[in-house]
Amino acid sequence: MKLHNLGTVIAFEVRRTLAKPTFWIASLSVPILMGLLFALSFFSGITAAQSSNASDAEATTFTYTDASGIVSAGVAERLGGSPTQDAVGAAQAVRDGRADLHIDIPADPAAEGVHVIGRDLGLMDSGRWTTVAQNLLEASAIERLGQPHLTGVLEGFPITSETWSDGAPAPGWASVIGPGLFLVLLFMAIVMLGQQMLNITVEEKENRVTEMVLTTIHPSTLIIGKVLGVVIVGVVQGLVLLVPLLALTLVPGLLPTPAGPDGAPPPGNFVAGLGIDLPRILMGAGLFLGGFLLFTGILVAIGAVMPTAKDAGTAFGTVMIAMFLPLYAMGMVMQAPDSLVSQVMTYFPITAPVTALIRNALGTITLWQAGIVVAILVVSAVLVLRLGIRLFREGSIAYDQRLAWRDILRSSRT
């Protein structure tokens, strides 16, 4: 394979993309938007907590009827309740707007249910009346038990737990973060670089300069150079996204720190609390690279067959759905990794990257199984990429129509 002028093609693709203001706007807008969303979530959480505290602090007055005998008069009085014998009248007072709340407790609340009649406070706040009724019955039942150790159990109690593996504390869910990052990277690479990969073989056909380009550069050199150029651009884009995030993880106290096996957070920053499993990290890297190469080869082949970017975009959407289909079956992949469906999705090239990355993050795939998946992905990617180069050569002058199936079959045999 002749790779003359490969460096020229790579440099041209990198310079052309990085010189576009739209590239930097799109790349920088993602971390900015993520920061804004984080800030909005943070402040909305504070606002919701303040609203909840204010609602809890606000005195509630209500009437209640109790046919069960469970309600304690002292508990009801502390909560703002007063007993009544006229359930119908008390309920009507709420409906007429003369009272806020009435709670009707039957003889067997568990079987018959408690009926709550409250003033409308809006969709979000009206649920507080149900909470008042629940607190009334629970607090009364706890008081009537009269045994502190039983009362403590009913009110809730702290639990500390630890899990061990091979004589060492297991990191638990913290160990998912490192290997799971490669699934996020694959998704970001496909979303942010997919269109550029698709244009590798489409743009020259749309610009009708394919024949002129191919007179000076071999098709393999052109395609490989463009692919490597887009990969370099993707690395730059990834650094723009990840460097600020990694910098944040090194600031102590800024991000939540995973708890240690004794329930207490370990000292240091966020990274210090992660369980770093190097074999699974390496497995994730291999699965990510294999999946990215396969995705690139498929897009190159699609672009070689389709006459315009619009036509190629439809096929691109289909490939996206197929590759991320395992996300819709994540429950089965997580709970039954050895089932037939999970096994098929693990080793079928199109669904293998996402399925294997999910299983790798959860630790349900062995090293040799991941090696087989990586081999399948790399071999499939090489075959598809070679086919894409041949299709590009066959369809280089098919400006207005898709490449015919006979040409595709002829290219696959050569």
Image: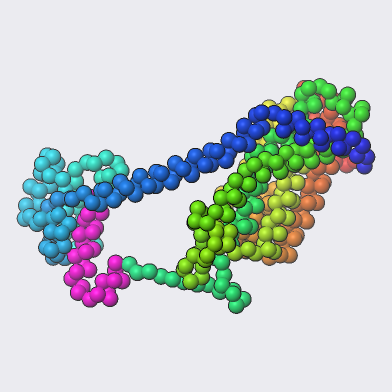
What residue appears at the point 80 percent right and 51 percent down from the top-left corner?
Answer: 379
Find residue 351 and report its horizontal and vertical position in percent: 67, 50
Q: Residue furthest left?
A: 85
The image shows residue 372, relative to residue 160, as above or below, that is: above
Q: Nearer the viewer, residue 356 or 61?
A: 61
Q: Nearer the viewer, residue 276 or 220?
A: 276
Q: State left or right for residue 173 relative to residue 122.
A: right
Find residue 208 and report its horizontal and vertical position in percent: 81, 22
Q: How is the image coloured?
A: rainbow
**Circle count:** 0
Find residue 387 and report its horizontal and vertical position in percent: 83, 40
What residue appears at the point 62 percent right and 32 percent down from the top-left corner?
Answer: 25
The image shows residue 314, relative to residue 132, as above or below, that is: above
Q: State left or right for residue 192 relative to residue 262.
A: right
Residue range of the region highlighted in magenta in the rendering: 128-155
Magenta-drawn stretch contains 139: yes
Magenta-drawn stretch contains 354: no
What residue appears at the point 43 percent right and 46 percent down from the top-left corner?
Answer: 42
Quadrant of the rendered structure where residue 250 is?
bottom right
